[in-house]
Amino acid sequence: MNFEQARHNMIEQQIRPAEVLDQKVLDVIAATPREDFVPVNYRNLAFVDMMIPLGHGQTMLTPIMEGRMLQALALRSTDNVLEIGTGSGYTAAMLAKLGRRVTTVEIHSALAQQAQQNLNRHGGRDVTIEIGDGSRDWHSDAPYDAIVIGGSVPLMPNSYKSRLKIGGRLFAIVGDSPVMECVLITRLGEHEWTQEALFETDVPALVNAPQPQRFTF
């Protein structure tokens, strides 16, 4: 398989038509070998518009979602980034290329180990993987310029909003299947945030994501 051609087609036929037009983002996607971050048996499907299983009930986001997320965050080269849900390490690798430093949290130690190997092969020196449950809070290097919550949450934890610097951005997928909304939350002041709806999707929930009170009859 010609991976370079497949990557080019992914960008030109999936990501760019989804209105991901930030050239910095497109360049980072082009320079990050997605095929090296997927399980071996999915290597030939690395560039398909699908969520690739990683084991332990986890998946990689689709290429379109990854591109739209990176564009929405508008990372600067000085940004300190937190990612909840390391998965294969692919998103962390791209976040590190766009920002300055990435702390990424993975609850499954086996996935964290594989992600570390993937990042080691591709120069992920600016990525620190920490093993733990980041479903409600994580503050080892707070405050952050940007936070990415890689799995869906029925209820947005307020703790993460407070971990942002003023001007910081938080990408999250909020809601219940089958209709969830990707949102970008920006901190404007000590007690002020804005929330922008980006697009709808349906992805697996973050492990141990906080649940709202449900009515029972």
Image (cartoon, rainbow, N blue to C red):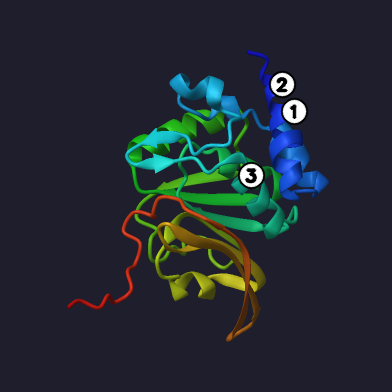
Residue at image mark 1: 8
Q: Amino acid at mark 2?
A: Glu
Are the residues flagged by discs 2 and 1 in contact, CB closer than 8 Å? Answer: yes
Q: Nearer the viewer, residue 216 or 169?
A: 216
Q: Nearer the viewer, residue 132 or 10?
A: 10
Q: Amino acid at mark 3?
A: Ile
Q: Quadrant of the N terminus?
A: top right
**110 relative to 197, above or below:** above
Residue at 71 percent across and 21 percent down: it is: 4
- Measured in 3D between alpha carbons, the distance from the residue under mark 3 to the one under mark 2, in whole angstroms, is 18 Å
Residue at 53 percent across and 70 percent down: it is: 163
Camera sees residue 73: yes
Lateral position of residue 105 relative to residue 201, left or right? left
Question: In what element is the residue under mark 2?
Answer: helix
- Tag 2 or tag 3, which sits nearer the N-term? 2
Q: Residue 12's spot in the image, x, y percent?
A: 76, 35
For label 1, the crowd category at 10 Å Cα-Cα, with few meaning under 14, some 14 to 19 and many 20 or more, is some
Which quarter of the figure has residue 47? Answer: top right
- Tag 3 or tag 1, which sits nearer the N-term? 1
Camera sees residue 100: no
Residue at image mark 2: 4
Q: Amino acid at mark 1?
A: His
Question: In what element is the residue under mark 3?
Answer: helix
Residue at image mark 3: 64
Lateral position of residue 138 relative to residue 123, left or right? left
Q: Which residue sits furthest top?
A: 1
